[in-house]
Image (cartoon, rainbow, N blue to C red):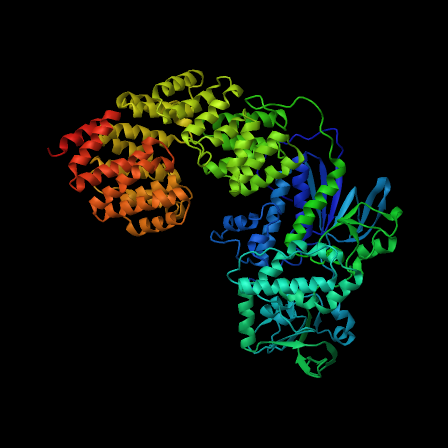
Amino acid sequence: MFFGRSLPEVNVSPARERYTVAVVGAGAAGALTAVQLCETALRRRTPLDLVLVDPAPEAGRGTAYATPDPRHRLNVPAGNMSCYPDDPGHFTRWLCRHGEPGVTGTDFATRYRYGAYLADTLAQAIVRARGVVAVRRLRTRAEGCSGAPGGRVGIRLADGGLLTADSAVLATGPAAPTAGRTLPALRDSGRIVARPWAPGALDPILTDPSEPSDVLLVGTGLTAVDLALTLDRPGRTVHALSRSGLLPQPHTLTPAGPMAAPRLPADASLGRLRRTVYRHVSRALRTHGDWRPALDSLRPHTARLWRSLTPEERADFLAHEGALWNTHRHRMAPATAESVHRARTARRLTLHTGTVTGAEPQQDGTLLVGLSDGRALKVGWVVDCTGPGRTVDDPLWASLFEAGAAVPGPLGMGVATDDGRVLPARREAALPLFTLGAPRRGELWETTAIPEIRVQAAAVAADVLAPLTAPRRAGRRPVDGHGLALSTHAEAAAAYRRGLDRVLKVRAGAEEAFGRAVALDPGFALGHAALALLGHECGGAVDVPRALADAQRSARERADERERSFVDVVTRRVHGDGGDAALMRHLETHPGDALALATAVPTIAFSGVDDLDDDYALRLVERTSPAYDGHWFHTSLLAFLRQGDGRLHEAGELAHRALAVEPASGHAVHALTHVYYETGVHAAGRDWLDQWVSGRGRGAVHRAHFSWHIALHELALDDPAAVRRRWQNQLSPGRVSGVRALVDSGSLLWRARLSDSWEGELPTDGVLESVERELLERPATAFTALHGAVALTAAGDLPALRRLRDHAAGADEVQREVVAPLCDAFAALVEERFGEAASGLDALLPMLRRVGGSAAQREVVEETLLYALVAAGRCDAAQRLLTARLDRKDAPRDRRMMAALPD
């Protein structure tokens, strides 16, 4: 049974009858299929009964991921082991949330850990789908399969039961190895372990109380590698034997960059493919110094190439290149390779090339095993590590072969399918059966690894549920707050409207409202896209890749053109792939999309479109005016942009007009805040904003930024005690963190110090500790970089300031041309080279608009220049700067500083 927190009820169409799907096998392939069935049915609101048939105590682990030995690691990096083909980082994020915060996509997790991930992902999918998908576990084996009335399928169970389903997915995994069955002397000796991964199979070897006897592993692939590590003991030699005598190659600790695949014609012969691939490998060695990128580039094309070969060519490949391919394609984790190297160096692991020719029991209970090279090995045990057999011959498949409901695949490997649907020997014997993974080996060749199986699982789930996909009923759809249609039901639309309203007002709770919308309708593409946008742009507690993947899946199944376009915009912004251009195209077609417009305009809520200067942003908002007809949100945006353009009187009128309709409009409040500051109306601005922050502003997302604005008024009014109280109560670490601590708290401390408004040591350490080092020293934007430089200067941290300067010098154009020299000037200030600092800062003032942000934020550089001029004894220049400032707006602080200058 699966348990989880209560979730909102999902609307399910009562007209649909429940459909039963059986998944036989709950290892990796079965678990991945069950996850996709649950999530696809949930998105489509399709009632489903899902039955998992497997005797294992825990779903997901199967044979491959049940081993608890920590030395057994995945042979694929964590970044390629996600359950979801469209969310490659899912497994890595899961590891980070479950006790391994430093893991990266290039790390190799243990196989047992991966089994836990599969089980947890399945459990979460079942919990989320509750109310739509009912899941049962039958802990028994399926031993037969036949047709049932109504075109259904009947599955005979080992416990005597019969399960009837509308369709079944046979996720039976790899076939059992066959080497042990072909050696009667070994089989009859009682000293062979034919299924080493079966529970307790190795116990007789591991718990033998006598001196450790040698062991022969028949096979030198990944199974043999894992068992060699498990069975390694002082005084024991583990022998590994195969026809090739080759161990798997290791992965590199630092993978080379990706490589494009060569041109591979679909009709090429095996000979031509050989020549092309060998030339490709040679090219990789010349350009990368490593053959691995060449082989990895072939992975997406392997199935197509395998299908293009004739049966004779496939057999030729298996005979001549099969072992070479497997040892280079299926590689060891670096840590595993190191352990194997140590065992071989110590001669506790020895490789042999050949086959077993015979075995003679000895009086001491050991075996004398003869090899094809004439040597004989005295061993206590033989372990079959030959890997999966070619044919699927368990009772379930045997019953299907006998009835003609299935036929063997190419070269007798696995079974024949039509893209996963099991093909019968004759049409009338066909059953609604699907399979994936190892049983498709004959037709796909590479089909046993997670990257291939997860794609097949998604495809199988879509095919299984295809008959249940009801056509969309024509009718009136619910709309957002601006009249744009939403592809969802009324209740989810209402939650979405609440979220959108909070975004436009710059108020808290948008994330929760959008989360509620997608919980009510998991197939609501726009809700998922809005969540991904908030997580990416605003730092919300959102699993952005997962929300984005859900948005893309849902958009493919149920969305109109506008919604698909917005999902594409968010996808491109998250991936840094032409998001700005896509957003501008979207707004040209859909000017009334308020969330898109809010995203495009640089404000307190969103970073906006890069290189969108104030004039262009203003023209964009003005151009979209007809779609909003004076709506308070649009008026608020216009007010904010007009103040940035210096049209302060117009901005004030627009802000008051918006606030008269919607007093909680954060954009209008922000615009009016700037108007008060830039016109020098400090006392009234302080009092009005303080009242708003304490009242309607309590729910504002960026309340700390409004508190920073109040503190600027208090600085200008020359009230140091008020500044200190404001910082302590509303802007100190613990109350503010992340980028807001950098931009607001850190800059306020420095500005207070510059104007002699802070006595004693600046508490910058707490601010810096609340900011991630990546954000501080390797910022993505020039705006963040500027404020990082300010905070590091306030702390006097020269080494970090120089690291930031080096980063900026290699970053985008604005960071190179503005931030890097700014860091140099700040460093000169810290080192008390005040004249040099003043010259550098003065040269940069005309360029500061390129950094972004408001004039009030960029003013910190001008105030630093003023400090440097005074410290350098350039009082005439300081006086001219103060005069210019007082001409722009009156401030008691500036008047006090002017009076303090020597005549």
Q: Is residue 539 above or below residue 445?
A: above
In the picture, the quarter occupied by the C terminus is top left
**Residue at (68% x, 68% y) in the render:** 323
- Image location of residue 800, percent across then percent down: 32, 50
**Residue at (36% x, 44% y) in the render:** 817
Q: How many marks?
A: 0
Q: Is residue 258 above or below residue 705?
A: below
In the image, taking residue 857 as reference, residue 322 lies left or right, namely right
Q: Is residue 630 above or below residue 759?
A: above
In the image, taking residue 156 as reference, residue 594 lies left or right, namely left
**Residue at (67% x, 81% y) in the render:** 377
In the image, taking residue 846 as reference, residue 529 lies left or right, namely right
Towards the viewer: 318 or 828: 828
In the image, taking residue 268 as reference, residue 667 lies left or right, namely left
Towards the viewer: 858 or 432: 858
Most distant residue in the left direction? 903
Asked whether residue 393 is in view, the answer is: no
In the picture, the quarter occupied by the N terminus is top right
| Quarter of image, res 340 | bottom right
Towards the viewer: 70 or 832: 832
- Image location of residue 168, percent across then percent down: 77, 46
| Quarter of image, res 791 | top left
Asked whether residue 297 is in view, the answer is: yes
- Image location of residue 374, percent across then percent down: 71, 84
Q: Is residue 897 above or below residue 345?
A: above
**Residue at (63% x, 53% y) in the render:** 451
| Quarter of image, res 290 | bottom right
- Image location of residue 405, percent across then percent down: 85, 51
